[in-house]
Each structure stands twice: as C-alpha cells, then as structure tokens.
Image: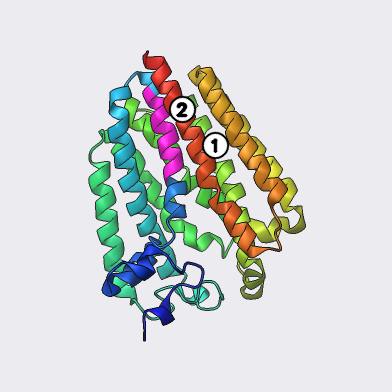
Amino acid sequence: MSDTAVRVADATGNWVDTLAPVWSRPYLRLARYDRPIGSWLLLMPCWWSAALAAGISGQLSMLPAWVALYFVGAFAMRGAGCTWNDITDRDLDAKVERTRSRPIPAGQVGVKQALAFLVAQALVGLVVLLQFNRFAIGTGIASLVIVAIYPFMKRITWWPQTVLGLAFSWGALMGFAVAFGRLDTTALLLYAGSICWVIAYDTIYAHQDAEDDALIGIKSTARLFAERTHLALVIFYGLAVVLIGAAFLTAHVHVAAWLGLGCFAAHLGWQVRRLDIADPALCLRIFRSNRDAGLLLFAALVVDAVLRAT
C-alpha cells in the first residue's frame, strides 16, 4: 500500500507526508506530529505557569530552561497520550470517517509496535521530569492516572472534555511545583481556569465528529450542548477568564499581564462569534486558533516577569 493511500484524512500535505522518511511516517502520525496543535495546547498552561511562577519567585534566569524543557516534555507526552488513545480507541476509530485512516485502524502499525512506541515517548517525558525537584516529579507522575483513564470517558460520561481538561491543564500546576516545590492558591486557580478553557475549545473540536459519535454511541459535550453550544462556550470561556484573572490577583501581576488577559478574552469572544457548529472545517480552524490565544497570554506573562525583575 502506498504512503499516499494511508495518509490520515484530516492531516494531509504536512511535513510528515512530504519530508519524513517513509518508515517513520506511521509513528509520527500516531504521535500526531503531522498535526501538532494538541501539543501546543498541552504546552500553553505549562508556559503560563512557568512564566507566572518565575515572576513571583524572581527566578527569571531559569525561565528559558523551563520553557525548553516543557516544550520537549509536552510534545513527548502528548505523543504518548495520543498513542495510548489510539490503542484503546482502535475499534471505534475504524467506524468514524475522520479517524479510520489513523495508523492502527488503517493497519500501518500493530498494537505491540504502538505500545513499544508509547513506552519510548514516555521515557523521553521521564527524562524531562527528572530535571526537576522531587515534588515536581511526583506531581508530574500523578497526571498519568488521568491520562490513562481519559480514552474511556467518552464511553461512560457526557463530559469527557472535563477529564481532558484535567489532563491538558496539568502544566498549570507544574510551573509552581518546579519553582516552589509546592502548590498554592494561584496555581490552583490557574489550573481551574485552564480546565474551563480546555472544555470549551475541545467542545468546538468535538463538533467535527458529532454525527458519527451519535451513530456509534460516543458521548461528548458537543452532543450534550448541541444547539446551546454558543451559550456553553460563553460560560466556560467566561469562567476561564475569571479564574485566570483571580490567579493574577493573588499573584499581584503588573498591568502587562492584565492586558494579555484582555487580549486572551477578546480572542475567545471572537471564537464564539465566528463559530458555526455545522461547519466542521471552521470548527477545526477555530479550535486551532487557541494556540494563538494561549501565546498571547504567555507573552504577557513573560513581560510581567521581566517587569518584576527590573
């Protein structure tokens, strides 16, 4: 079977399809390196937390190293999480138009090969984690419980996006665990705000598969909210902004951080106004735009950290 014939349906024309060695392509697709948006979204709370903790603690000189380590860790662990998700969902993925061309249901990678690849990626994440203090190592390892159960949630609850939020927002805790060796109110508020953000943007993402999910009995907030999705997004994006703002209040941030939060909120508002849940391609574009929203907030927190240090 040619490589062209086994490309993933919703991720074509990327660097994996055109530049990566042919033998590596199924594994890179399994880890989603052909569509890295999920890795970026996993990374954003890590970077927010790192920048905010650096500003509070005065450890600005450590921020570049933290940023680099979180980058490697986020891409490795998102790849491991996606591999685990595809192993557990291989039968369901074969029934959905958008996912049936993924490497396992398409027959490009066997389950044993996928498990070996999962372990390799997890070891990369462990190497990153071992660069930090014991409390941070324990905090990072604790997240694996949520990652392990997430793929099964869509079978038993209408709120799998909440479990994804718990997992994808874990980085909001890590910056404080690394900088202080503990978690405080600021970290928990940032974590809660990020969870609301994830619930909202993954609801947008899930609308791509709402019809197929209904046919095979998969639950999601997209199906739960349905025509009330815009209202739900206003609520959850609003909660995200309020909770992150509460974290900023407890952290006594400068005006730069507040301006960044304002830009973040404006971007989320634009998403709600622009969204048409009946247009899968638009849902995907709006979902992907959350990386830009996250980067706006991160840039503002870096400026805040620099201002604190001067």
Estimate the spatial distance between the alpha carbons at disc 1 and disc 2, rounded to whole Å.
18 Å
| Quadrant in the picture for residue 17 | bottom left
Residue located at (40% from left, 29% from top): 51
Q: Callout 1: 10 Å neighbours few (<14), some, many (20+)?
A: many
Secondary structure under the numbered disc 1 in the rendered image = helix
Q: Residue 118 lies in what quarter of the image? A: bottom left
- Which of 108/155 is in front? 108
Disc 1 to disc 2: CB gap under 8 Å: no
Which corner quadrant holds the N terminus? bottom left
In the displayed image of the protein, which residue is found farthest to the top? 310
**Residue appearing at x 42%, y 54% in the figure:** 147
Task: Tell me the kind of residue under disc 1.
Answer: Ala
Q: In the rendered view of the protein, which quadrant contains the C terminus? A: top left
Residue bearing mark 1? 192
Which residue shows up at 64% across the image and 64% down it? 280
Can the viewer see residue 206 in this picture? Answer: yes
Image position, residue 242 (x, y; %):
62, 30
Choose the circle earlier in sequence order: 1 or 2.
Answer: 1
- Percent position (x, y) of residue 300? 48, 28
Instruction: Confirm whether the magenta stretch covers residue 47.
Output: yes
Q: Which residue is mark 2?
A: 301
Residue 183 visible to the viewer: no
Q: Residues within 10 Å of mark 2 (few under 14, many from 20)?
A: many
Magenta segment range?
43-54
Q: Amino acid at mark 2?
A: Leu
- Image height of 105 relative to 173, above or below: below
Is 141 displayed left or right of 231 in the figure? left
* Element marked by disc 2: helix
In the foreground, 280 or 191:
280
The residue at 30%/32% (across/down) is 64
The residue most toward the right is: 227
| 1 vs 2, front mark | 2
